[in-house]
Amino acid sequence: MRAPAALLLCLGVASAANAAAGCDRTCLKDTLDRCVEAVVAHDPSRLSVARDIHFTENLVPLKFGHEGLWTTANGRRDFNIYVLDSSRGDAVWIGILKENDKPVMVAIRLKVLDRRITEAETLVGRAGLGAADTVAGPRPDFSQPIPAAERASRERLIAVANSNWDAMEQGNGDLAPSCRGRARS
């Protein structure tokens, strides 16, 4: 998958709880909140994780809880965007942490199965965030449910997320259409 965080950001509205995943929307959000707190506290023991957890930071495999942002985070801002898909056990938190006292934009994607984290992917934006200390917060649309009649199919959302890379590579924002306003395909 080319852009997992962008894809999950577009998914916006999650489906009903899945017995196989064992974690509904509330459980996923709580797991994300505990994960962010654990990162800032440098304490992975606060989390229920699979023995063979797969962890990456900025696409580099690292030892979960002991490398990367886990050793350098030292605070957080009240800036939270949650994307929760309980049908798949996927959860994303996008927010602002402090790393060595400097603001960094962070996206954390978790895969939760049987209430254990089996995958953790962290993307850390360490450059170009001069206003991260002063930005008011996420746009309100990020937390608004999309009416069922306006929701796009999963396939359409994947295509939109993937088109974002084409738009960036070619410098043409028209190549990345909106997730909203399209009939379900």
Image (cartoon, rainbow, N blue to C red):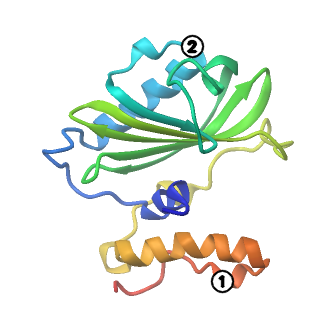
Please name the residue that numbered disc 2 is placed on: 41
Foreground residue, 95 or 106? 106
Query: What kind of residue is marked 2?
Result: Ala
The quadrant holding residue 149 is bottom left
Q: Residue at x 85, y 47 (%)?
A: 128
- When the figure is inspected, residue 68 is found, relative to residue 23, above or below; the finding is above
Percent of width and height locating residue 86 = 27, 49
Q: Nearer the viewer, residue 79 or 97?
A: 97
Query: Residue shown at 40%/62% (left/top)?
Result: 145
Tell me the element at label 1.
Answer: helix
Residue name at image x 55 percent, y 60 percent = 3
Q: Is residue 15 above or below residue 160?
A: above
Distance from the alpha carbon under mark 1 to that under mark 2: 41 Å
Mark 1 belongs to which amino acid?
A: Leu
**Residue 170 against residue 126 in the figure, above or below:** below
Q: Residue furthest left?
A: 19
Residue 151 visible in this rendered orientation of the protein: no
Q: Relative to 168, is 90 on the left or the right?
A: left
Q: Quadrant of residue 56?
A: top right
Tell me the number on the disc at residue 175.
Answer: 1
Query: Element at badge 2?
Result: helix
Query: Residue 27, image x and y in percent?
Result: 29, 35
